[in-house]
Amino acid sequence: MTRHARNCTAGAVYTYHEKKKDAQASGYGTNAQRLGKDSIKDFDSCCLSLQPCRNPVITKDGYLFDKEVILEYIIAKKNENSRKLKEYERLKRKEDEISLDKATAETNQKVERFLKGENSIISKPTSHFTSEPSTSSISNMAVGRDKELPSFWVPSKTPTAEKPKLQKPHNVVLCPISGKPLKVKDLIEVKFTPIKDSGEKKSLIARECRYMCAVTHDVLSNSVPCAVLKPTGDVVTLECVEKIIKKDWVHPLTSKKLTEKDIIVMQRGGTGYARTNAELEAKQERPALQA
């Protein structure tokens, strides 16, 4: 049995500890880090600009956007889809012209082969008693077949891949977060209730606690689950929804009837706790270190 030193290089096994140590020192492998509170947006921030919303609107899936930002995104996507559609139509016309020219050329070749075969017919007496040597061969290089085969070392004879089939682009704007179809008429205006008489002389955006529940006046934050009432856009806590609204299904501010579709659960920001957020781990892919 060999002696094991601190820097033993005689082992036949590349251990996990050695691999991890070398990967950390050389910059190979995958870096995984748990995200903190400061790495994720606030509950009242836009999902695109990551800044506090001036005119907040929300989608049916609960994603909050600034109205100006999301409208610019929708207009940009519509222009991009229109450009892709025009490019598709141009390529489609070009492809149709090429296919028409190809079909015409094939028809002309068939006619030429037919006429050539007709002209080569001659009346020649045949003898059934004489045997002619057979010239048929199974070789791929015989009877001029070598000119038809592809060649990987001659550039002019190298086989080429087929062109991908054209696909018509979708003329639908998708939500940048959920990936579902997004329309301007589906955006619902949100009305936050600011905290009054907080004693702070800072502006509303600079405050750490800015808004409260429209019914219970509880302070809203990333750690408090919130919901938006669709008819008026008021933001309330889920606790208020469960304990007050769902008893009679009546809007507590306007006394109008509500349904399950009128309650939109807001997607929360980051708190740093795994129980609150589903994905708090960030990974950085690096070149793999082979053993």
Image (cartoon, helix red, strand yellow):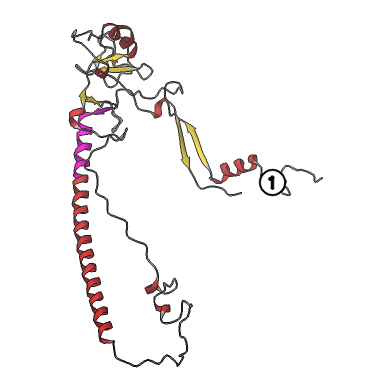
Q: Which residues are magenta?
A: 64-80
Query: Is residue 2 rendered to the left or right of residue 228?
Result: right
Camera-side residue of 124 and 37: 124
**Disc 1: which residue:** 13
Quarter assignment of residue 190: top left
Query: Is residue 219 rendered to the left or right of residue 17?
Result: left
Asked if residue 71 lies in the magenta stretch, the reply is yes
| Vertical order, 188 against 201 (above or below) | below
Q: Position of residue 114 (x, y in %)?
A: 25, 79
Secondary structure at numbered mark 1: loop
Q: How many numbered badges does the structure rendering display?
A: 1
Position of the N terminus by quadrant: top right
Camera-side residue of 77 and 20: 77
Q: Position of residue 204 (x, y in %)?
A: 26, 19
Query: Is residue 23 rendered to the left or right of residue 100?
Result: right
Q: Position of residue 168 (x, y in %)?
A: 24, 49
Q: Residue placed at 33% from the left, 7% from the top?
A: 243
Residue farthest toward the front in the current orientation of the protein: 129
| Vertical order, 175 against 9 (above or below) | above
- Report whether residue 100 is seen: yes
- Report whether residue 55 is seen: no
Camera-side residue of 196 and 86: 86
Label 1 is placed on what type of residue?
A: Val
Q: Residue placed at 60% from the left, 41% from the top?
A: 20
